[in-house]
Every structure is written in C-alpha cells, then in structure tokens.
C-alpha cells in the first residue's frame, strides 16, 4: 500500500486538485494500492519544506508543488499511476514458434498461471517469407494458416500431456490463435492494446537463421513491450523462485520498480537481492540503499533481503558472478521506452542478458 498525501489548505486550487485526484483514483482499477491522506495541519505542512501549495507527496516524497500552473489530469496521471501498479501474472501471452525452446517457455507460463489462477493466450505469428517449414513454397491464403493451426493444436496437445500432473491441481484456461504478420511488431502491439499482464517467451529458437531471427524477436520484445516480459532460457528447468536479483541503471525508476519486485518476491516467498555494480569507477547501476531498505521494512518486514556493492570489469560480468555465487533463480532488470539515447547502454546489456543468461530474465518497463 502506497500513501499519497494531498498537502495544503482548502482554497480553490487545493479543492480542484483533490477533485481531480479522486476522479483519477475512482476510475482506476488498481486504486486500492493507494491510500489518500489530506494534510491540512500547518505544522505538518511546514515539515515538508515546500515552496508552494497545494502539493502532492507519495510515501513522504514530494512529487509536485503548484507554482502558479494548474496540474492537468494527464500530468497527474503520469505522477500517480506508477504507484498503482504491480507485477501481475494472471493474463499471460505466450508466443510460440513450435520449437523446444518455446515449449519450455509455455510450461513455465502454465505453472505461473496455475499458481496465480490465471489464463494463457498462446499465439503463433508467422510470415510466409520467414517460414523455415516451407522455405521454397509460395503463400496460399487459407492453406498456410490451416497448416499453422494444425501445428499449434499439436503443440498445445503435447503441452497438455507434459503438464497433466501439474494441471491436476487446477485448470488453466488457454486460448490459441494463429496470426499472419511480423512477430516482433505483433507481440508489441498486443502488449499495448490488449489485456496482457505478462509476456512469457523463450530466448532463442532453433535451426539456421531462425535462431538469429527469434533471438532478435526476444530481445526487441523485452526492450519495447508495454508489459513485463519473462524470458526463459532453453536449458531452464522449472523450479520455484528462491532468490530474486534486481538490477537497475536509473535511480529515478528505482522506488517504483523496487516496490513491484518486493511484492513479487513476497508472493513467491523468495529472498530479494539488490546489487550496485561498479564498473571501472563508473556507476551505471545507481540504487539508493536507504530507499530499498525503507520499502522492505515498511511493506514486507518479514522479507529476507540484501544489498551489495559489486566491483567488476563489466556490469554483465558482475551480475553473472553474483548470480552464480548466490544461487539466483530470477534476474529482474528495468528499462524505459522514453529515451533511446539514455537507455542505449542498458538496451545493449539487456540484449546481452537475453542471449547469455541461463536463468529467467524478467524485464520491467517503467513507463508502460
């Protein structure tokens, strides 16, 4: 639960902001994640050391002060909405290319959906020009899609057989669909336009240039999707999360994203590790230890956690070393859609993780 404080006295500006805030909360399905408190006592207002009122603070941190300009509903939503979110795993999108890698990713998604009473949308997205099953053939509308539907049905049947024992504990609703188009663009579109809480997909495909093609799909989706993306390596064996590692290179994102990961760790009854990797005296991963500890103490006092500074020749090497030393089961990283140049380093690191990591990688997006 996050505490939002509306600070000021009952003038017109204060009342307008309160009305806009209440409208936003009443129309948001996740507003239960915020508790609204009005701060009107002068002594308490003075403690915030404000330059103007009305003002908004979340969890004691001032995020807005009115200095002659009214706060638009759009700007208010931008400030508030990140604190209403959490890592949901009820509606899971699973793209498949019918490979063993995507089958492994489906099994992971099925287990995740089972534990969260969720459902799965299984999709195969194919463009005839990139179809290795028929590299020399021509595209005949209808017949091509019929073949793909048959393959998808066989894929799902094999998956149901593999997951029969786990399914005995409950039933996962699965919808399947064959789509014609470019995989990356279609997956990203679905992540933004449909009700998808998480995408679960493999990190690489099989066979010839398809290996590079699907690998690039994984990395691009991880960077550009508008929901969390869970990437499952080919060799990964299904097991509970015991130790989750969080890494970020943008301190402005950390308070919001750490809260999501803390909630995620509590749900999975896992320990959470946060590291700051120092690379050649540079600090691409800047995380405030005090913020992390405050969040854990207030929202999850029974959660086992650790904060560590790691010195390494590269961020990738530092993370890999920590993963092996501490038996990490899941790595979580954060990115943003807004600044391509600002995130270039981080995007390159994300792609490196996609191709070389042997545990699941959960990519969170700050601005979805």
Image: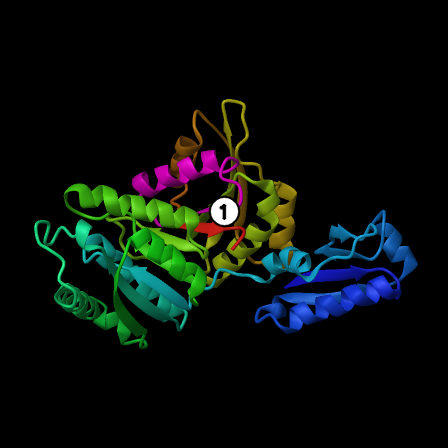
Residue 3 in the image: state x and y as whole percent.
70, 61
Check if residue 108 falls in the magenta segment: no
The reply, left or right, for residue 251 in relation to residue 345 is right
Q: Give the quarter of the image for residue 175.
A: bottom left
Residue 313 in the image: state x and y as whole percent.
43, 24
The reply, left or right, for residue 117 in relation to residue 50 is left
- Front residue of 319/297: it is 319
x 62%, y 53%: residue = 295
Q: Residues within 10 Å of mark 1 (few under 14, many from 20)?
A: some
- Front residue of 237/362: it is 362
x 86%, y 55%: residue = 45
Residue 102 in the image: state x and y as whole percent.
24, 56
The reply, left or right, for residue 91 in relation to residue 289 is left
Q: Which residues are magenta?
A: 332-361
The reply, left or right, for residue 156 in relation to residue 365 is left
Query: Would residue 361 be seen by someone viewing this image from the given angle?
Result: no
x 10%, y 54%: residue = 134
Query: Would residue 22 be seen by someone viewing this image from the given angle?
Result: yes
Q: How is the image coloured?
A: rainbow
Going by the picture, which residue comes out furthest to the left? 136
**Label 1 element class:** loop
- 287 in relation to 107, above or below: above
Q: Give the quarter of the image for residue 5.
A: bottom right
- 327 in relation to 345, above or below: below
Q: Quadrant of the N terminus?
A: bottom right
For mark 1, what is the residue? 337
Going by the picture, which residue comes out furthest to the top? 280
Residue 4 in the image: state x and y as whole percent.
71, 61
Check if residue 350 falls in the magenta segment: yes
Q: How many marks?
A: 1
């Amino acid at each position: 639960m996050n505490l939002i404080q509306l600070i000021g006295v009952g003038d017109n500006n204060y009342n307008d902001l309160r009305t806009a805030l209440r409208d936003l909360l009443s129309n948001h399905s996740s507003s239960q994640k915020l508790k609204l408190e009005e701060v009107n006592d002068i002594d308490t207002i003075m403690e915030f050391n404000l330059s103007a009122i009305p003002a908004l603070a979340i969890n004691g941190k001032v995020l807005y002060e009115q200095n002659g300009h009214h706060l638009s509903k759009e700007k208010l939503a931008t400030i508030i909405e990140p604190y209403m979110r959490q890592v949901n795993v009820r509606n899971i999108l699973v793209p498949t290319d019918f490979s063993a890698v995507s089958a492994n990713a489906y099994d992971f998604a099925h287990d995740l959906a089972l534990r969260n009473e969720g459902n799965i949308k299984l999709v195969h997205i194919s463009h005839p020009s990139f179809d290795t099953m028929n590299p020399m053939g021509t595209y005949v509308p209808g017949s091509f899609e019929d073949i793909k539907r048959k393959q998808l049905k066989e894929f799902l049947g094999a998956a149901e057989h593999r997951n029969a024992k786990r399914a005995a504990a409950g039933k996962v609703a699965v919808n399947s669909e064959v789509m014609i188009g470019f995989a990356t663009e279609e997956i990203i579109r679905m992540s933004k336009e449909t009700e998808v809480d998480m995408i679960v997909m493999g990190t690489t495909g099989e066979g010839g240039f398809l290996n590079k093609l699907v690998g690039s799909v994984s990395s691009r989706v991880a960077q550009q999707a508008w929901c969390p993306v869970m990437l499952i390596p080919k060799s990964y064996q299904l097991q509970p999360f015991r130790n989750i590692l969080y890494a970020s290179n943008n301190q402005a994102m950390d308070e919001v994203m750490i809260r999501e990961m803390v909630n995620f760790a509590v749900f999975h009854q896992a320990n959470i590790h946060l590291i700051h990797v120092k690379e050649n005296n540079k600090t691409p991963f800047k995380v405030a230890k005090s913020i992390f500890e405050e969040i854990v103490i207030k929202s999850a006092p029974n959660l086992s956690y650790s904060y560590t500074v790691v010195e390494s020749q590269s961020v990738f090497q530092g993370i890999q070393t920590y993963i092996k030393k501490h038996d990490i089961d899941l790595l979580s990283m954060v990115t943003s859609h807004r600044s391509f140049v600002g995130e270039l380093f981080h995007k390159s690191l994300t792609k490196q993780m996609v191709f070389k990591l042997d545990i699941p990688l959960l990519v969170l997006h700050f601005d979805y």
